[in-house]
Amino acid sequence: MTRIARLDSRALVRVSGPDARPFLHNLLTQDVETLAPGELRFGALLSPPGRLLFDLFLHGEADGALLDVAADRREALLQRLGMYRLRAQVTVEPADAPVLAAWDGPAEGFTADPRLPALGGRRYGGDIEVNATEDDFQAHRLALGVPDPAADALADKTYPIEANFDLLNGIDFAKGCFVGQETTSRMKRRGTIRNRMLPIAFDGPPPPFGAEVLNGDLRAGEVLTGRDGMAMALLRLDRLDGALTVEGRTVQARRPEWLAVAG
């Protein structure tokens, strides 16, 4: 049975006007110039040094795009886009439609999640009956080993490749310039990727956010968000082999099938 939930942790920003597409295209990691109305893409707005500030879904509209962002970061995004707007002929404003997710089957009016087909689809607005909770959706996402950058990546601390944006269709390396592009492209080109977010499995409740993952006596990473039995962790790729522990408990790093880890 298809499950549908309202994602109250997400909110919307509408960017419209004659310059909306080039304005966003020059800022974000995703190609916005070719974004068709109704199409959904995944991307981010980075800091100039190339660290994650906002993870975003971009839903194409006739005169711009609808941005799906963490609800508690919407005001900060509005301010950031306002800072970049300058003389561009764009309108940047909040939009009030709910963000909905559907999974475990088809759902009319939902657009496929661009990160991973198994995640299901997303929809913005509409009189839709829900039969699941946001917590159900987050459990589904975590079971697939897909991080939630808004929760797992502290703002301006994590590189997008560490959060697997390059493997989840979140970066268009062929589009040309975007904020933070130099660092992001250099990491990918040189293969200097030391850390990635991976799921870890364990018995019992999740360790606290930031708890150290050890490989013997060596630091192997840190725990991010999770639930009983599973969590995301930012792990060093060169320290995955061997016995991993967190606060004395044994944990196992998992490589989801979709994630071909590149070190």
Image (cartoon, rainbow, N blue to C red):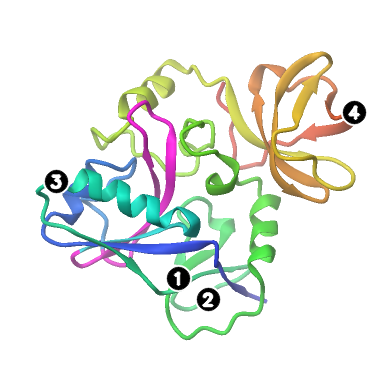
Q: CA distance from mark 2 to mark 4?
A: 44 Å
Q: CA distance from mark 1 to mark 3?
A: 31 Å
Q: CA distance from mark 4 to mark 1?
A: 43 Å
Q: Which is more foreground, mark 2 or mark 1?
A: 1
Determine which quarter of the picture holds residue 139: bottom right
Identify the magenta region. Answer: 37-63
Q: Earlier in the sequence, mark 4 or mark 1?
A: 1
The residue labelled by disc 4 is: 248
State the residue at coordinates (45%, 53%). 73
Res. 86 mark: 3
The residue labelled by disc 1 is: 123
Judging depth in this view, the residue of 160 and 263 nearest the camera is 160
Q: Amino acid at mark 2?
A: Ala
Q: Earlier in the sequence, mark 1 or mark 3?
A: 3
Q: CA distance from mark 2 to mark 3?
A: 40 Å
Q: Which is more foreground, mark 2 or mark 4?
A: 4
Compared with residue 103, is residue 223 higher up or lower down, i.e. above or below?
Answer: above
- Secondary structure found at label 4: loop
Q: Which is more foreground, mark 2 or mark 3?
A: 3
Report if the CB atoms under discs 2 and 1 are less than 8 Å apart. Answer: yes
- Secondary structure found at label 2: loop
Q: Amino acid at mark 4?
A: Gly
State the residue at coordinates (41%, 74%). 97
Compared with residue 129, is residue 236 higher up or lower down, i.e. above or below?
Answer: above
- Secondary structure found at label 1: strand
